[in-house]
């Protein structure tokens, strides 16, 4: 059975040399928070923005690999506009989510759930989105390229150990090219901004967290239906590695992002564990993710 599983898993990875673009991203917009006297009434521009962003992400080739249509990386970008002007300047918050299927199941696991509090850009109707890896074009295309490469990095890391490194490097290049484009691209602003996400993914001291991303998804989750005991053991092992890294480098955004994607999934994974195991994991999870400690305490009392 194990050999058969590995055979089909290998086919899954090898089949990314056939055809189709890499991303399948759904883009949604909300203008509810824009003041009525601003550009909220100019409703014709928002469907255009939605369309050009979605086409840019899904139609552009981001890698040298080719995917089967059904293997495209599933992601979503929800943009909540907060300000808009008649000259085409927009301020917004955005949530970018990336997921992938778990082998042999209908379940999809969230890889990244990232909130961008500075999704600000300029767009005038009819403007083409042109992007070049080697230079800064405009804030909108730069942000979208950053998201695309970050999605690829998380997805590839989940299928092979450090497999997303080429895309981590490309995301860092996007950040470097945008250093004069606003605080969200620099080290002087919010530690959870685009700069710090890129820095965390490249940081050698945090590399065990990226190594463990493969363990969590490819070794534990993809085999969980057949061997939940081993799956829980591997995930617990990864969480203990995370605890060590967190003790050495506390407060890193990559740890927070992991739990924003995985907290409920972890509760579900360990809910069927024996009582002693649930209590131990509840204590460990609460120490790593105090924000969701109530849910973990309930897990320990099941």
Image (cartoon, rainbow, N blue to C red):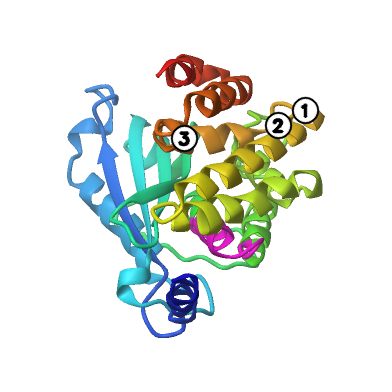
Give the structural element (helix, strand or loop) at label 2: helix
Q: Nearer the viewer, residue 249 or 282?
A: 282
Q: Position of residue 30 (x, y in %)?
A: 26, 35
Q: Which residue is mark 3?
A: 266
Q: Position of residue 254 (x, y in %)?
A: 62, 38
Span shown in magenta: 148-164
Say whether residue 106 is visible: yes
Mark closer to the observer (3, 1): 3
Q: Quadrant of residue 271?
A: top left
Q: Quadrant of residue 159?
A: bottom right
Q: Nearer the viewer, residue 104 or 253?
A: 104
Q: Position of residue 251 (x, y in %)?
A: 69, 26
Q: Which residue is mark 2?
A: 243
Q: Local crowd at mark 1 within 10 Å, few (<14), some, or many (≥20)? A: few
Q: Position of residue 300 (x, y in %)?
A: 48, 19
Is residue 205 positioned above or below 172 on the image? above
Q: Local crowd at mark 3 within 10 Å, few (<14), some, or many (≥20)? A: some
Q: Nearer the viewer, residue 218 or 225?
A: 225
Q: Which residue is mark 1?
A: 247
């Amino acid at each position: 059975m194990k050999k058969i599983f590995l055979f089909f898993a290998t086919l899954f990875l090898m089949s990314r040399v056939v055809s189709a673009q890499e991303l399948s991203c759904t883009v949604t917009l909300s203008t509810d928070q824009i003041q009525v006297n601003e550009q909220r009434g100019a409703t014709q521009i928002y469907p255009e923005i939605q369309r050009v962003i979605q086409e840019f992400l899904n139609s552009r080739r981001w890698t040298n690999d080719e995917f089967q249509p059904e293997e495209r990386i599933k992601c979503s970008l929800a943009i909540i506009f907060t300000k808009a002007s008649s000259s085409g300047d927009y301020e917004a918050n955005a949530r970018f989510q990336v997921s992938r299927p778990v082998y042999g199941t209908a379940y999809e696991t969230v890889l990244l759930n990232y909130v961008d509090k500075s999704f600000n850009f300029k767009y005038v109707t009819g403007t083409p989105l042109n992007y070049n890896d080697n230079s800064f074009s405009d804030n909108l295309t730069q942000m979208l390229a950053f998201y695309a490469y970050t999605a690829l990095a998380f997805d590839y890391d989940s299928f092979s150990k450090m497999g997303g490194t080429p895309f981590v490097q490309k995301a860092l290049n996007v950040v470097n090219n945008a250093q004069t484009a606003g605080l969200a691209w620099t080290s002087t602003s919010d530690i959870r901004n685009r700069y710090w996400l890129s820095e965390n993914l490249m940081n050698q001291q945090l590399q065990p967290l990226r190594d463990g991303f493969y363990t969590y998804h490819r070794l534990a989750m993809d085999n969980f239906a057949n061997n939940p005991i081993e799956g829980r053991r591997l995930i617990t092992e990864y969480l203990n590695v995370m605890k060590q890294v967190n003790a050495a480098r506390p407060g890193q955004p990559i740890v927070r992002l992991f739990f924003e994607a995985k907290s409920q999934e972890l509760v579900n994974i360990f809910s069927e564990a024996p009582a002693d195991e649930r209590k131990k994991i509840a204590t460990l999870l609460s120490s790593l993710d105090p924000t969701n400690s109530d849910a973990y305490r309930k897990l320990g009392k099941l």
